Image (cartoon, rainbow, N blue to C red):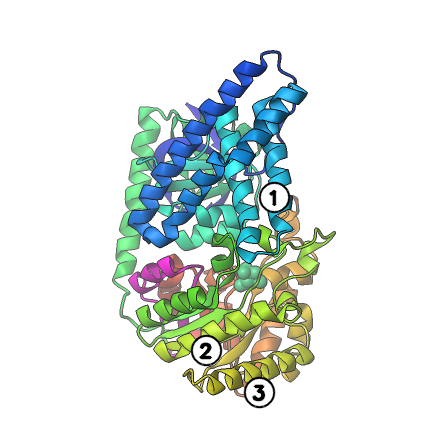
Amino acid sequence: MITLSGKSAVGGVAFGKMSFYEKKEEQVRRYTVEDVAGEIARYQAGKVIAIGQLGSLYEKAVEEVGEENAAIFQVHQMMLEDLDYHESIENIITSQEVNAEYAVAVTADNFYEMFKSMDDEYMKERAADVKDVSERLIKVLEGRETVDMTSNEPSIIAAQDLAPSETIQLDKSMVLAFLTREGSANSHTAILARTMNIPAIISMGDALKNEYSGREAIVDGFTGTVYIDPDAETIALMKEKQNADLEKRQLLQQLKGKENVTLDGKKIKIYANIGNTSDVGLVLKNDAGGIGLFRSEFLYLENNNFPTEDQQFQVYKTVAQNMGGKKVIVRTLDIGADKQADYFDLPKEENPALGYRAIRICLTQKDIFRTQLRALFRASVFGKIAIMFPMIISVEEVKEIKEFMEEIKNELRQEGIPFADNIETGIMIETPAAAMISDLLAKEVDFFSIGTNDLTQYTLAIDRQNPKLDKFYNAHHEAIVRMIKMVVDNGHAEGIWVGICGELGADLDMTETFLKLGVDELSVSPSMVLSVRKKVRETDVSKL
Ligand code: PEP
Ligand code: MG
């Protein structure tokens, strides 16, 4: 038995086989080959395998998301069969006497640029597809182990690190646990794992070796330990731990339907954070009072291109309807920094967390903003949608947003499209600037939601993505507690409610403090709703 350790990001125990997820963009090696004909044959064999994989993906997708959405895999198959693409690869192998992977990578780059420069919007959109399909082919040629999404066997996914865009695209039902060599507890990948309630261990370092792929393992997300080829004693112990965890969860189920009220009668709202329509089931299962943060950018990360107004409308409408009149706070696009989608073509930045992201993109590229706001307004008649804006630093930004919303409402009125006229609008308080001027901002909006993940990163000047800084990262730092108090007081002075939607909201060691400060709402990952409720019900604020 081999024992590995890392940092716990999400608790829970999982048993299963290890499977390594390879980064999409690995450096492709170039080397000369003597047997050119053999290399071409190798390329052709790889192509047949890749086309086969796409065929299976197509069939699976037809079942899961319907023919129309599955069609992309047929487009990918056609790309691999395209004559020009094929000729380019063969030419490079023959003329330069190089390996097939390299020829595919160069062809992919050329085709990417060619598609990108076309005037036709449809063709432009194919640029990302040609890259995607070529990466698949390169992986097949290199014989790299990848997560087989068509496999029927759920596995423990191990990786160097996982970008949010990669995590969101994994088939959740096939993931038993996440293990990464890098990663930090506040990264969006850890947050996603928490939302899915999948055990996760990060910062495992090089001890997490690719050679463990396919081997049986047990993940103890509570202690951050992984046992490869576990012995009988460990299996028995871990089974016991898993059962105890299950029992605890079942006990929490008894709190369903109960109020979030302290022993001395103080009430608080407990909502849930989601990234996707498929998380709504978890929200309802865990009896959250509403959705306090719908990270809408995950819609963008799942797609190969900007989601259209109609696509977004369908998503917001479904979530609003499924929540049956309970509040759904949708945060507008918060892309940039660690959340990147190729098609946004965002420039590389020295300090992405301090760069072109979130509301800054929306207020610059207003077409993107318009599409999302129109979709949100249209969906507002199907439930109780509220809109929230990320990364605010000034009153001017909020005024500009409000003016733009009026413009869009007028547009919709003129087009005879109905929308709810009482939509609550709020902002995230996640920059020190916003916290410091929260007295002024409170006059402009209906609510505040404190994003402690970014507020902590910007206040402590600690990159939330950097695991090296973990020992300096103090989520309970007095500066953060003071800012929360300041924001709550300033919000209440103007008669608006104040919630917390960052990860700190679910920190049970902080629940008493939040109650004492008068926080009105805590929005936490769905699996934490009942634990926070339990903590609230055991607290007596008058005695604090
Ligand atoms: C936050 O910053 O606390 C927050 C909730 O937003 P995100 O984690 O998506 O940046
Ligand atoms: Mg944030």
Residue 505 inside the magenta-drawn segment:
no
- Sort mark 3 into few (<14), some (14-19) or many (20+) by Cα contacts within 10 Å: few
Mark closer to the observer (1, 3):
1
| Distance (Cα) linking label 1 and label 3 | 54 Å
Q: Nearer the viewer, residue 194 or 175?
A: 175
| Residue 537, quarter of the rendered image | bottom left
The reply to whether the C-beta atoms of the residues labelled 2 and 1 are less than 8 Å apart is no
Q: Which residue is mark 3?
A: 493
Task: Report the magenta residues as a range.
Answer: 264-289
| Distance (Cα) linking label 2 and label 1 | 36 Å
Q: Tell me: residue 308, above or below residue 77.
A: below
For ligand 1, give the image quadrant: bottom right
Which residue is painted at 52% across and 27% down in the image?
209
| Residue 37, quarter of the rendered image | top right
Which residue is painted at 62% across and 57% down in the image?
336
Return the mark for residue 522. none
Which residue is painted at 45% across and 23% down in the image?
45
Return the mark for residue 377. 2
Q: Which residue is mark 1?
A: 112
Residue 489 shows up from this direction: yes
Which residue is painted at 46% across and 82% down in the image?
423
Residue flagged by tag 1: what amino acid is it?
Tyr
| Distance (Cα) linking label 2 and label 3 | 29 Å
Residue flagged by tag 2: what amino acid is it?
Phe
Q: Earlier in the sequence, mark 1 or mark 3?
A: 1
Q: Earlier in the sequence, mark 2 or mark 1?
A: 1
- Sort mark 1 into few (<14), some (14-19) or many (20+) by Cα contacts within 10 Å: some
Residue 42 drawn at (x, y percent) = 50, 20
Residue 275 inside the magenta-drawn segment:
yes
